């Protein structure tokens, strides 16, 4: 799995917040979907005949692995008997898969005990963002891409999935090329 690029450069010498320099100059925003970035735990489920036969969770490289040149995360099997993975499996058990084709699907596990529950959800569930008919439920229209407009626009958006809460950010998906890029609200510096 490849990390999703942030659309603006960062102030690597200072606070690591973004600056106005656009980094993804090769990205086709005009032909991309702007979707809500859901704040949960990245997982992958393997589906066969509407049944989940495998559950994996994202693993980021350690500092040692990064020093060895490993930059991108990957998936490892989740363990239903591991207390740390119990909320992932709770999310799987609370999600309907009858409309999900056979295959491996990247998803976000969301809910009360995951990432502080910024979406204010009750219980746990999966959202399969890699499945187009699910992803279409969280599409925002007319999302600006210039720095100042986006900085003003993002904090004023309400989640299309959560319960009366803001959004973490936006992920742009180019359906034809498969390319993605993102921006998070916390990437910006806001004057106090």
Image (cartoon, rainbow, N blue to C red):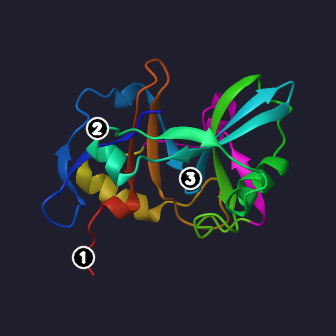
Q: Secondary structure at mark 2?
A: loop
Name the spot of residue 35 as percent of width and height, x first. 52, 42
Q: Which residues are magenta?
A: 122-142
Where residue 42 appears, x then y in whole percent?
58, 47
Q: Which residue is mark 2?
A: 69
In this rendering, position of residue 116 left or right of residue 127 = left
Instruction: State the quadrant of the C terminus.
Output: bottom left
Q: Which residue is mark 3?
A: 38
- Dividing the picture into quadrants, the one containing residue 136 is top right
Q: Which residue is mark 1?
A: 191
| Nearer-N-terminus badge (3/2) | 3
- Image height check: is 18 above or below 140? below
- Secondary element under disc 1, as helix, strand or loop, is loop
**How crowded is the residue under tag 2: few (<14 C-alpha within 10 Å), some, or many (20+)?**
few
Q: Nearer the viewer, residue 62 or 25?
A: 62
Residue occupying the point 71% across, 65% down: 121
Between the residue at mark 3 and the residue at mark 2, the CA separation in whole angstroms equals: 28 Å
Which of labels 2 and 1 is toward the front?
A: 2
185 drawn magenta:
no
Considering the numbered disc 3 on the image, is that residue within a helix, a strand or a loop? loop
User: Cα distance, mark 2 to mark 1?
Assistant: 36 Å
Q: Is residue 83 above or below residue 93?
A: below
Q: In this view, which residue lies farthest toward the bottom?
A: 192
Q: Nearer the viewer, residue 79 or 43?
A: 79
Q: Residue at x 25, y 47 (%)?
A: 8
Number of on-image labels:
3
Which quadrant would residue 101 be assigned to in this image? Answer: top right
Residue 111 seen by the camera: yes
> Residue 162: percent from the left, percent from the top?
65, 60
């Amino acid at each position: 799995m490849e990390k999703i690029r942030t659309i603006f450069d960062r102030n690597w010498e200072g606070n690591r917040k973004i600056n106005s320099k656009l980094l993804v100059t090769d990205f086709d925003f005009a032909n991309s979907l702007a979707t809500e970035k859901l704040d949960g735990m990245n997982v992958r489920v393997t589906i066969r005949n509407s049944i989940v036969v495998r559950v994996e969770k994202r693993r980021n490289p350690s500092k040692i692995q990064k020093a060895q040149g490993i930059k991108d995360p990957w998936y490892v099997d989740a363990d239903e008997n591991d207390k740390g993975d119990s909320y992932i499996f709770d999310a799987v058990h609370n999600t309907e898969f009858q409309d999900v084709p056979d295959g491996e699907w990247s998803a976000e596990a969301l809910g009360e005990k995951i990432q502080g529950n910024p979406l204010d959800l009750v219980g746990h569930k999966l959202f399969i963002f890699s499945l187009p008919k699910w992803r279409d439920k969280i599409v925002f229209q007319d999302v600006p891409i210039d720095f100042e407009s986006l900085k003003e626009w993002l904090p004023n958006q309400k989640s299309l999935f959560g319960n009366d809460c803001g959004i973490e950010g936006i992920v742009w998906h180019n359906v034809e090329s498969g390319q993605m890029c993102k921006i998070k609200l916390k990437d910006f510096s806001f004057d106090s």
